Image (cartoon, rainbow, N blue to C red):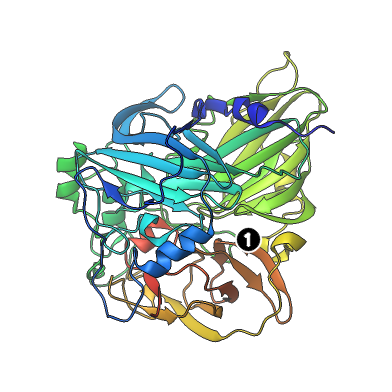
Amino acid sequence: MQKPSRRTLLRAPFAAVGAGLLPSCSDSGPDPRSGPQHTAGTGAFVPQGPKGFVNPSDPEVLAAERKRGSGPVRMVKLTAAESTLDLGGRSVRSWAYNESLPGPLVRVTAGDVLSLTLSNQLPEKTTMHAHGVRLRNDMDGAPDLTQPSIEPKTDFIYRFVAAHPGTYLFHSHVGMQPDRALYAPFIVDDPREPLAYDKEWIVVLDDWVDGIGGSTPDQVLAQLKPGAHMGMGMGPGRDSPSPHGSAHASPSPSNARSKSGSKTTGPDRVLRNSHSSMLHGEGGNVAYPHYLANGRVRTDPSVFQCRPGDRVRIRIINAGSETAFRVALGGHAMTITHTDGYPVQHTKTDALLIGMAERYDVLVTAKDGVFPFVALAEGKPGKALAVLRTNKGGNLPSANVRPSELDRECVPARRLLPAESVAMDDRVPDRDLLIRITGSMQRYDWGFDHKVYDVRQRHAVRAGERVRLTLVNATDMWHPMHLHGHTFAVTGISSAGARKDTTIVLPHRKLVLDFDADNPGLWMLHCHNQYHSESGMMTVLGYQK
């Protein structure tokens, strides 16, 4: 089968997300001074914290970036601003990139230098994080750790080599902003793409609350904390501490009102008595009114058109903030080819469980008809829906459709094996790190080792080490854990699993992750449940000098 050309990929339908944003190539060629650039110009940023660690723009970081090479420069501009968004027949006010939901598709080829200008037209500070990308530390977008936050009415240029092909995600890394529309898909194409397929379909999933009935994510976070609402069944307890020294401290409801224009109190969005057998406990704690596929509610889904017999690559991205999705395409089995951007040994499955910020690439051979792509909110009421159509006739599926594939085989990430090209060797770890995941719903005191985030924290590693990170989940909740700037292998006693950057840790279980310390700097490790991370479940891995 003929492989699709780059032009074919760029023309591939992206459902309701909007046109792919093809960056232009600069005439001047690669800029060896690639690095942080405010429009006003600043020196290298040095965060608070102990001495003896590699800072975000130190020579070690610049040397690692030079090793990634320097290809053509692709210029992109995104504007973060208050916007009116159409969810599929319903308009809401929120914050978005380029007034679209999801934000515009950014696409480059591995080896390109991406020069992305983020213009902040929001009423508060922001940053942008390239989730899953192994990039230079000062381009990571972690506020007050790798850069100062971008002030309103100013720009910041994110400039880095996109060295590794894969399916990635841009999103804000400030406060509860990611639970608005401040996210966009990021695809790095492989110039030697080994897969053969005819069409590509990008599906971005999300849980949505902003602007519905006067709700904002900041208000929902306030509702989840003890004492926010008497009689809500939250249990006794003091107010949980805010993350001391955190760049992510959430605004109070009154601040939320001044920034978003919404009411200081919205509808009760606390979800009680949720349960998922797959997640070994509660599915989540936020009762989202809508779940979206490519920015649309299930009553008005986006439709992807192809021909019967077409081999379709589906890139699935969970951009949600508090929801795992169980996904399936009605009438079809899926072949998993990648997880979190890295290839795996091809594995057939009927369904997938995708935690927040995880990504999966799958191949399907399209049958003749109209088929629902359903994303169940795991452990919660509700679902997202998109449609695959291969003929002109036939009605769209019901908004309540539930394909039988959702209840068939669901291959978990821990069973996936890496492709030979990305498999880690069985080197003995040079360093062991043990981190306990702590906190409870009753106190909403999420953290690591009973500590909330402080920008001055450091878990020390050294360049060149093989690090074994053991995460022990001592809570009753599941957590999608993300390590910035690296990929890890989910490992067993004697074998390494798939390469990932985000993975689910089930309640009262431990997960052992191996990674190579090959990207100097200061890197966040955090839960990608936005409500947990904002309550303190973040820490820092730092490279020692």
* Nearer the observer, 102 or 93: 102
Q: Residues within 10 Å of mark 1 (few under 14, many from 20)?
A: some
Q: Quadrant of residue 54?
A: bottom left
Q: Residue farthest to the top?
A: 393
Counting every numbered tag in the picture gives 1
Name the residue that disc number 1 marks: 278
Q: Is residue 212 visible?
A: no
* Nearer the observer, 502 or 387: 502
326 vs 85, left or right, is right
x then y, percent, for residue 515: 57, 72
x then y, percent, for residue 353: 63, 53
Quadrant of the image for the C terminus? bottom left
Query: Residue at point 44% right, 69% down?
Result: 520
105 vs 426, left or right, is left
x then y, percent, for residue 63: 45, 65
365 is higher (above) or lower (below) than 256: above
399 vs 350, left or right, is left
Quadrant of the image for the N terminus? top right
Q: Residue farthest to the front?
A: 28
* Nearer the observer, 165 or 35: 35
Query: Residue at point 65% right, 32% down?
Result: 6
Query: Residue at point 53% right, 57% down?
Result: 68
452 is higher (above) or lower (below) than 13: below
* Nearer the observer, 214 or 302: 302
Q: Quadrant of residue 430?
A: bottom right
134 is higher (above) or lower (below) than 215: below
x then y, percent, for residue 525: 43, 68
